[in-house]
Structures are given as structure tokens and as C-alpha cells.
Image (tube, rainbow, N blue to C red):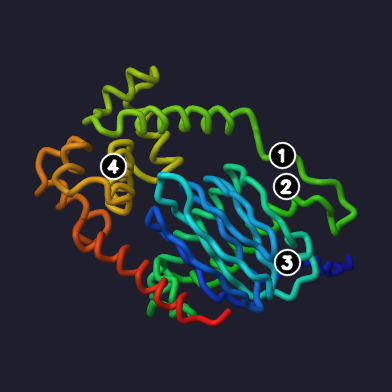
Amino acid sequence: MTYVKTHLKREIVINSIITIHYFEYIRDFIFHGEAHDFWEFAYVDKGSVRIQAGEEQYLLHAGDIIFHEPNEFHAIESVGNTSPNLVAVSFVTHSSAMQIFRQKRCTLTMEERTLISKLISIARETLATPMNLPSIEQVKLRPNTPFGSEQLILLYLELFLITVARNHGAQNTSTQSPAPTFSPERAMNKSERMEKIIEYMEFHICEQLTITDICEAHSLSRSALQALFHKEKGCGVIEYFNNMKIERAKDIIRDGTMNFTEIAYFLSYSSLQYFSKQFKKATGMSPLEYSSSVKGISRSLRREDTGRNI
């Protein structure tokens, strides 16, 4: 018996990473723009932004993504009353298949958003440089990272790009038929149920929800609810709800519409001290430190932007 090797084609290969950012912008954020000789994409995780790409301007909402090819000028500003969160990833690739992403903007599927989430998660454990600082021009690696962490960043990024190309590409570089949409009945049911539960918690974000409240509202047993969240979100339902409260608190701090005492009362914390303790446990910073951080980053970027000759 003779075995013959089959060499598989690699459509998209990432050669190196430039930056991986997760920005939590203040409400009136403006970045007047730049251009560089590598690829970048910007994904809106929350809120809305106006992005300039070349000579065109686009309004992007939560779930939308835009790709900037090398040397394309791009700028961004927040719009509306909600402080936006943005994922920005820049990288080097010489793959010809990247032509699919020229002038590409689309709304990501849940599958694609999950890949973004995994990419950010593995980047947090691999990179030593802060992900929220726009002035970072080179990432630094943590010492003694888990086995394969650096390669996982490349693999998740390549998988994400290939998935987007297959799902949204107007033209295929391959002669094969497009892959079927990722929407099995069972997965859709879980996704829809999870979405409804999260919407319910979002609606009651200012209350002190219990597991019993959530179970009764969605006709689920306690064990089924916990199993769903541990499988889909990697944590318990109350832990997830508490994290939602912290994210809402961060939004309000960045908006500047309430002081810390008002935020604690608004989100039904028993005291300002307890709110501050939970906030620091979740973010590593006190509310005051977080407020100073986001405002300082914005001021720093504006100074850099003002001094930059574009």
C-alpha cells in the first residue's frame, strides 16, 4: 500500500500581529485618523460610531465590523448617547485572498462574534501590553504564557477571517460552493433562549435579581439555567448578571451623568462601599481610578492627535 501526501491550501495566513485593542471610549470621543501599511479591522461591540474609510464615511452600530486595507486612511468618532466599546486588531498578511476584505463592512453573526470574543480572551492572557491604550504601537508578550497561546492568537484570527469571508464574501476565490450557514436547530434554540434571558437581565439591571426570579421568568429549573450559562458563558448566571452591572456602571462613569453614590443607588448596590469593592474586584481599579483612566487616555490621545501631521 502506497500513501501519498496531500498538501492543503492555506487561503489566509497571518504573518504577524501589530496591535490588539479593546477600547471603552467616552461618549464624545474623536480620533482624527491615520493610515498605515498593514491591515486593520474595527468591530463595534457596543454603541455606535462614525468611521471614515478613505473618502467615505459610515455609521456602524453594535455587531458591525469594517476592514481597512493597507494605506487606507481611517478615522473614528463616537455618536449618540451611549459610550461605545470597540475591538481594533491590526496585523500583517500577504495572502491574496485578503482582497475579499477591501472596502468590506458587514454585521457579524453570533458565530463570528464568538470568535472575536475568543481572540480577545486569549490575547488578554498572552499580551502584557494594556489593550485599552491607543498609543501602543507594539505588543509585548507575557512571560510564561500557557502552552500554545501565541499560536492560538494566529489561529483564531485566521479562523475568524476565513469564516467572515465564507459567510459574507461577495466573491469567492475558491471554486467550491459556500459552506452552509451555521444555524443548527438546537444551537439556534439555545442562542435564542440565552438572548432572551440576557435581555431580561438587561431590562432588570437596576434590580437585585435572584436565580429564582430568572428561573420563573423563563420556565427553567435552577440546574438547567446554571448549566446553560456555564456552558455558553463559562460562569454562573448571577456572576454574569453582576458583570453586566459593572459594565453598565463603567458606561455611566464614562458618560459622566452620575456620581459614584448615584450609580451605586441606581444599580441597587447596598452601599457605595460595596459597589466600590465589587467594581475593583471585577476591573482591578476603583471607580475613581477607572474614571481617571478613561479620561486620561482620551486626553492623551487628543494631544497626540493634535500634534500629528496627517
Q: Are marks 4 and 2 in contact (CB under 8 Å)?
A: no
**Which tag, 4 or 2, sits closer to the chain's start?**
2
Give the camera-side residue of 42 and 166: 42
Q: Are marks 1 and 2 in contact (CB under 8 Å)?
A: yes
Q: Amino acid at mark 4?
A: Lys
**Which tag, 3 or 2, sits closer to the chain's start?**
3
**Which tag, 4 or 1, sits closer to the chain's start?**
1
* Above or below: residue 32 compared with residue 110: below
Distance from Cα at disc 1 to Cα at disc 2: 7 Å
SS under mark 1: loop
**Side of 244 relative to 272 (left or right):** right
Residue annotated with mark 3:
12
Query: Residue 157 location in percent, x, y?
Result: 60, 63
Residue annotated with mark 2:
167
**Which tag, 4 or 3, sits closer to the chain's start?**
3
Query: Residue 282 location in percent, x, y?
Result: 26, 54
Give the camera-side residue of 86 and 153: 86
Characterize the local packing of mark 1: few (<14), some (14-19) or many (20 or more) Cα atoms within 10 angstroms.
few
Distance from Cα at disc 3 to Cα at disc 1: 20 Å
